[in-house]
Amino acid sequence: MTEHALLLDHGNLKRRNRFNRVVEASATVAAFLAVAVLVIVVGSVFLRGIGALSWHFLTTPTALFGESGGGISNAIVGTSMIVGIAALMAIPVGILVAIYTTEFAPGRVAHSIGFVLDVLNGVPTIITGIFVYGLLVAGHKQSGFAGAIALAIVMLPIVARTSQEVLTLVPGTLKEASHALGIARWRTVTWVTIPTAAGGLVTGALLGVARVAGETAPLLLVSSIFAPGLLTEPGEALASIPIFIFQASESPRPEAHTEAWAAALVLIAIVLLLNVVARAFYARSRKRMGA
Amino acid sequence: MDIRPPIESPTMTEPNPEQQASAETRFRPPLRVASDAGEPATEPHGQSREVGDVELRGLSAHYGSNQAVRDVSLRFDPAKVTAIIGPSGCGKSTMVRCINRMHEEIAGARIEGRVLLDGLDLYDSRIDVVAVRRSVGMVFQKPNPFPTMSVIDNVTAGLRLTGASRGELEDRGRAALVGAGLWEEVKNRLKGPGVGLSGGQQQRLCIARALAVNPEVLLMDEPCSALDPVATLRIEELIAELKQRVTIVIVTHNMQQAARVADTTVFMLDGQLVEVGPTDKLFTNPDDERTEQYVTGKFG
């Protein structure tokens, strides 16, 4: 028996190789399919909406009574305001919750809070919408502010969970070094932990914003009937891009459908941009902590 | 130098409440009576005691139900280097972490017994744990400069909270870097990132950072184990210089290192203190058989 016998084909080598190739091919095809879905969605929105996209479209408010010649400037401003106010509420609270659970809470409490956040994350946004409707709109009036509160509730668990994840990644050795220097707990959190995790915290915030920028259900209930023109008063109902898409898609005017696609394109562009920037911050943060 | 088992000497009485109370006011702000400031280290009752006098009395340390240190009584010579050697898991690092009260940071960790610094019980309920850590500094195994701070900000990190002025921070930072033998190498890149230095430089940066708050004692937990031999040698030379200013306790796996730097060596096994004595004696003619087996490499 020579050594070569060990290297010879033991009968099922051909079958194993074939199986390897099949699995590899399937995995590659699946990956391409996933990418293809995104490309198809973005591509078709682009193709169908580009016809109505213009500078005029972006800077003119929606025309009265669904007539043609309007744009989405009020929707863009409205979305910015609603999402902006929601972010101002949800991001600080989310980050503080994350700091509490990772730095100060005992293990069991931290676990429970994490669980509650996950449940909140899974609540369908229409329910959040109904809740805010019952709380703020029923018997009163619609408002952009109510929309902001609904979106803040949706945003909170995303920001909190991502921030938690990033804060946990801060190496324990850094916190140890800080404590060993005689630096008090809260100062360590403020001057060492948060700056080290800063990139990741920004990521969590951006991802939260990206997620709620397109939330339609709550806004349908609390900020869907609004005056014409460019509105900037959050105490009143505001226009928003998702609502515009919804309303334009139901309009009898044929051009309105193209306008809806164009608005969808704008929304996708905003969300994509936020995601790309968020990932860039996250990569920078990971690099910092690995250094 | 002879072996000093922990005895109740006349100068080492039980810390009485009176002494404790007056010493308490001394304890915050930082305890350190700086030798570089030219002040003598005197105690309230006129007894002159050397700074950096650490004593352990019946110290036991637990992680939950697991006991890592068993009834250790030991005194560290001030202004000298004491090395702690022993096999992995014998409790060296745990014991040392009890001195600057880092042990209690771990959930479920507790101690019994006493840790005294200059006669003061560091675990007394009136003592501020933050002040303890400013008197007892620590350098860790893996260099850990703060990644978001520059070199100079790293060095002065421990100082910035006392409201010192900008100029004073720079002066003390510079003094600390000089003391750590790093000034010449970083004086032109003080604003550069702390993590941009080499491994050995980073560790000396951590030593400078610890020295900047003027501790009486410096604990070093295997400070050279992540460094190359050249960097290790530099740090050992640094230790020889530093011991006049601070009492140094160094945990090390490396017996040759202990033989090179330490005046006194302590051998621990399974959480217990087996033998303590002058380094030469411990390595050439130890009293305990287990010590002899360890230093000759029969186990560990």
Image (cartoon, coloured by chain):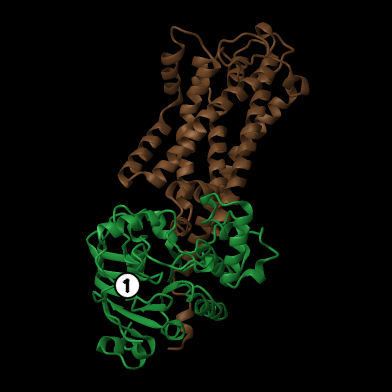
Q: Secondary structure at mark 1?
A: loop
Q: Is residue B183 above or below residue B279?
A: above
Identify the residue under disc 1.
B89
Query: x, y percentage for residue A247?
Result: 59, 15
Query: x, y percentage for residue A83?
Result: 57, 26
Q: Is residue B103 left or right of residue A89?
A: left
Near-viewer residue (B187 or A268): B187
Chain where mark 1 sits = B
Q: Is residue B91 above or below residue A77?
A: below
Chain A rendered in what hue?
brown
Q: Quadrant of the N terminus of chain A?
A: bottom left
Instruction: Name the residue located 55 percent from the left edge and 66 percent from the top edge.
Output: B208
> As drawn, which residue projects farthest toward the bottom?
B285
Q: Can residue B271 be seen from the camera position used here?
A: no
Q: Is residue B243 left or right of residue A255?
A: left
Q: Is residue B264 above or below residue A235?
A: below
Q: Quadrant of residue A88?
A: top right
**Chain painted in green in the figure:** B
Within 10 Å of disc 1 (Cα), the crowding (few <14, some 14-19, many 20+) is few
